[in-house]
Image (cartoon, rainbow, N blue to C red):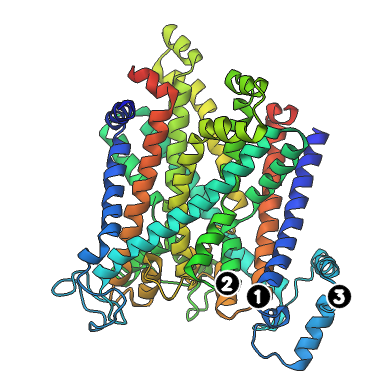
Amino acid sequence: MKRYVARRLLTGLLTVVVVMVLNFVIIHAAPGDPVRIMAGMEHPSEAQMEELRVRFGLDKPLWQQLFIYMGQVARGDLGTSYTYNTPVLSLIADTLGPSALLALTSCVLSFLIGTLLGLFTARHQGSWIDSTLSYVSYFFDSMPPFWLGLVSILVFASTLHLLPTSGMVNLRAQNTGWALGVDIATHLILPCGTMTLIQIPGYLRLTRSSVSQVMQEDYITTFRATGMSEKQIFRKYVLKNAILPTITVFGISLAYVVTGAALVEIVFAWPGIGRLMLNAINRRDYPLLMGIYLMLSVSVAVVTLAVDLLYAWIDPRIRLK
Amino acid sequence: MRRLTQFKAWWRQSPHLRIGLVMFTLVALVALFAPLLETHDPYRLSAPSRMAPGGEWLLGTDALGGDIYSMIIEGSRTSLKVGFIAALISGVIGVLVGGVSGFLGGKTDRIVSEIVNIFLMLPTFFLVLMTVALFGSSMTNVMIIIGLTSWPGNARLMRVQAMSLKERVFVRSAEALGESRLSILFRYIIPNGIFPVITNTAMGVAGAILMEASLSFIGLGDPNIVSWGQMVYAGKSYMTSAWWVSLFPGLAIIFTVMSIYLICDGLNHVLNPKNARREA
């Protein structure tokens, strides 16, 4: 177990280092002067350029600059966004709550609905419901999430006037307490529904194929031969074995919880990290963009690591391999 | 001839493969004969702004006066080009890296697979996005960057294949006969182990099409080229007054991506020895 943990920790750490190096290389390999890129404008003032040169040690050799940059990141200093005039880290921290709310809700919902639908189709393999659901799942799988978001705004917000088009709260209402919760929930329905619909097909197909695989195992045939009822076999033996891969995928999706919803956040003007990213791109705010990429990579690495360790703890086959 | 019978058997076996191939052939034909099918020049903005579908402009016009129908036809070329070139780049790199690493084994393999593991953990979309934002959003850049960031999955598949193939008798005999390692890799390991990579690369075509659409949607598409993603992006501000601008190109993306997914699913089905045995 100790060796397994150490190895996973090392990979996680290396990933973060690789991300820092990638950030550094991209900035320096991109066409144009790094100073102008970091300042986000063609003609930064002398004072700005001087500050950046000192900060990143731009007169020193490249490898020293890399270490300076890595040192700053390690101290939690991701630089300052020139368009917001605020430290990058605090900008990102402000968006994490809304992003996590949207992404976590849709992760859990799609896991539950997808797995249940998958179990249902697996029980009714070959039926018309099974084949219809299979094509519907491919349809949603092929859909760009942002497009589904736009269409759902068109249908439910602008045509039927059932739900708000965008944002997280009704700014005019100034709600507090219980009313604020209801307000956020109504704003959450469309973006969360979009994300959920997009993620359901994966769970559906995985559960279906995993169940039919387990059904073909010899021990299931043996149970059948003993005359055990089909229902009991399914509940007691198939379900437990077939659900494992689904839970694994759920774990992986938790790692991408913050990154996955970025485009949908943009469509619904959800005040999360996706919208911050869009602003960073539109305003050429590269320190902010690099900071977002770094934070996202770190969060993916950390959650993957946590999920891996949790599995190793649950399933001895993994840690002993 | 034998290949043809094999294909016929597959065709009969999987409805997904059948439907997917028909859909994809349609997209490919549209892309091939695009100039004949277009009713207006997709790059000329001559029509009135935001005309509803029907009449002279089959699927309406966008805010700048482009004909949606002709632009969708033209966009098929863009999507297929991005998809195939990006997937090809990622396939070639994946096969070479995975093949060499699995075949050589030892220290090389340990280092390479650690690198692959790290790359698999990186959030690809954001890396592509940041690189395109900094290097400029030309079509060539987009294709190359998608290709350069999506190879680790292919490498992992090829590596496993190479590891199992190198223990097989025919590879061992070639080794005993004194064939060079390079020649063994290219003549035996890669041709025999490439099939899972091909299916994965086909999925990569769909992935690249979706990724180009996503990049276009945040304004990082090539402004000199008509693409479905950019059409959706252009229509997003007019969703309530001119829904057709975003709706139709989105359907085109879904149709194309779905055809590829169905083909891949069908291929996985017919290539799975378990299913083949049941058929026989």
- Can residue A286 be seen at all in this image of the molecule? yes
- Can residue A144 be seen at all in this image of the molecule? no
A299 and B53: which one is in front? B53
Q: Who comes first in sequence, dot 3 or dot 1? A: 3
A309 and A185: which one is in front? A309
Kindly identify the residue that appears in the image at 47 percent across and 15 percent down. A220
Q: Quadrant of residue A227?
A: top left
Q: In which quarter of the image is the N terminus of chain A?
A: top right
The nearer-to-camera label among 1 and 2 is 2
Instruction: Judge if badges 2 and 3 mark residues of a common chain.
Output: no
Of the numbered discs in the image, which one, if any, rests on residue A60? 3
Of the numbered discs in the image, which one, if any, rests on residue A286? 1
Give the labeled residue for mark 2. Answer: B133
The nearer-to-camera label among 3 and 1 is 3
Dot 2 crowding, Cα within 10 Å, few <14, some 14–19, many 20+: many
Q: What residue type is labelled 3?
A: Lys
Of the numbered discs in the image, which one, if any, rests on residue B192? none
Q: Farthest residue toward the front?
A: B178
Image coordinates of residue A291 in percent, x first then y, are: 69, 69
Q: Are marks 1 and 2 in contact (CB under 8 Å)?
A: yes
Q: Mark 3 lies on which chain?
A: A
Mark 1 to mark 2: distance in Å?
9 Å
Kindly identify the residue that appears in the image at 78 percent across and 92 percent down. A47
Say which element carries label 3: loop
Q: Which chain carries label 1?
A: A
Say which element carries label 2: helix
Mark 3 to mark 1: distance in Å?
21 Å
Q: Farthest residue toward the top?
A: A226
Q: Which amino acid does label 1 sit on?
A: Tyr
A71 and A94: which one is in front? A71
Say which element carries label 1: helix
